[in-house]
Image (cartoon, grey):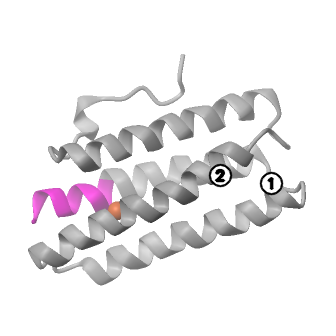
Amino acid sequence: MPILAWKDSFLLGMPEFDDHHRHLAELLNKTHEQYTINPAGGALETVLLKLADYATYHFQAEERWMEEKGYPRLDRHRKEHDTFTEAVAVLEKECLAGQATSAALFFFLAEWFSTHVLESDADYARKP
Ligand SMILES: [Fe+2]
């Protein structure tokens, strides 16, 4: 049973971005699996690579859409994206050094999903 069961209430009504967010939820669930096995460590290399990839294509796509639509809170939104990208880069370095923990990654992703995806992303979907 995944820790985060996908709900239709997560949908923005924008299929490309909704698919991206569904993928993020899968990565969050994979991280939680590692957390239940080994919270102080965990096999995180693959999920971190996928998160870095996600940050590149998903954030570029969202920001491009916001630019096209003249979304008024693009700067603030972009800063949140940059924070995510930097945090993943730090976790990748820690992973290479054998210091990344599935606990840290899981709680980071859970916070990101609840505050960024469900609040900040929901905002641009409501106010294009
Ligand atoms: Fe976003």
Which residue sits furthest top?
1
Q: Give the structural element (helix, strand or loop) at label 2.
A: helix
Q: Quadrant of ligand 1?
A: bottom left
Say if mark 2 contacts mark 1, CB within 8 Å: yes
The x and y percentages for residue 125 are 16, 57
Query: Is residue 71 at all visible to an observer of this figure?
Result: no
- Residue 46 magenta-highlighted: no
- Residue 124 magenta-highlighted: yes
Residue drawn at (21%, 61%) of the image: 123
User: Between marks 2 and 1, how big is the CA–CA gap?
Assistant: 10 Å
Q: Which amino acid does the dot numbered 1 rest on?
A: Ala
Mark sitting on residue 72? none
Mark sitting on residue 48? 2
Residue range corresponding to the magenta coloring: 119-128
Q: Which amino acid does the dot numbered 2 rest on?
A: Leu
The x and y percentages for residue 17 are 27, 50
- Image height check: is 53 above or below 83? above
- Residue of label 1: 100
The mark total stands at 2
User: Disc 2 or disc 1, which is closer to the eye?
Assistant: 2
In this rendering, position of residue 77 left or right of residue 122: right
